[in-house]
Amino acid sequence: MSMFNITEIRQNASKIIAHVLKTKEPVVILQRSKPVAYIVEAQTYKDIQEKLKKAEHYEKVITTRNSLQRLARLRSEMKKQPDSTPLIRRLREGDARRDE
């Protein structure tokens, strides 16, 4: 991977871009000896963005699958509750006694 400082970019921008297009490799732009940006070929950038979208979608799918698995596990661990309909009916009618 090639590295150029900002002054070199200003002076040789077209040559540096031609280098990127020819080699298909990114160029690092340095400012005070620290990387501040990259120049990449447009198709490479599009490919990276597409892979990022797929990775984000995959992450959402995995998260959803794990949540559904946890929910299914919790449901299987739950005890079946008695039907509350008869109790509610008796309470509405004013009879709070329980038929055992």
Image (cartoon, helix red, strand yellow):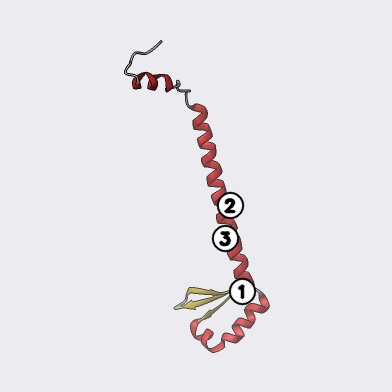
Q: Going 39% across and 21% down the picture, which residue do you hit?
A: 89
Residue 11: x and y in percent read 53, 89
Q: Earlier in the sequence, mark 2 or mark 1?
A: 1
**Mark 3 neighbour class, 10 Å CA radius: few under 14, some 14 to 19, many 20 or more:** few
Q: Which residue is mark 2?
A: 58
The image quadrant where one finds the C terminus is top left
Is 66 placed left or right of 92 in the picture?
A: right
Count of numbered labels shown in the rendering: 3
Residue 70: x and y in percent read 51, 36
Q: Which residue is mark 1?
A: 42
Label 2 vs label 1: CA separation? 24 Å
Kind of element beneath mark 3: helix
Q: Going 54% across and 37% down the picture, which residue do you hit?
A: 69
User: Are dots 3 and 2 in contact, CB under 8 Å?
Assistant: no
* Residue 42 figure quarter: bottom right
41 versus 69 height, above or below: below
Is 53 placed left or right of 34 in the picture?
A: right
56 versus 64 height, above or below: below
Q: Going 34% across and 19% down the picture, which residue do you hit?
A: 93
Residue type at numbered disc 3: Leu
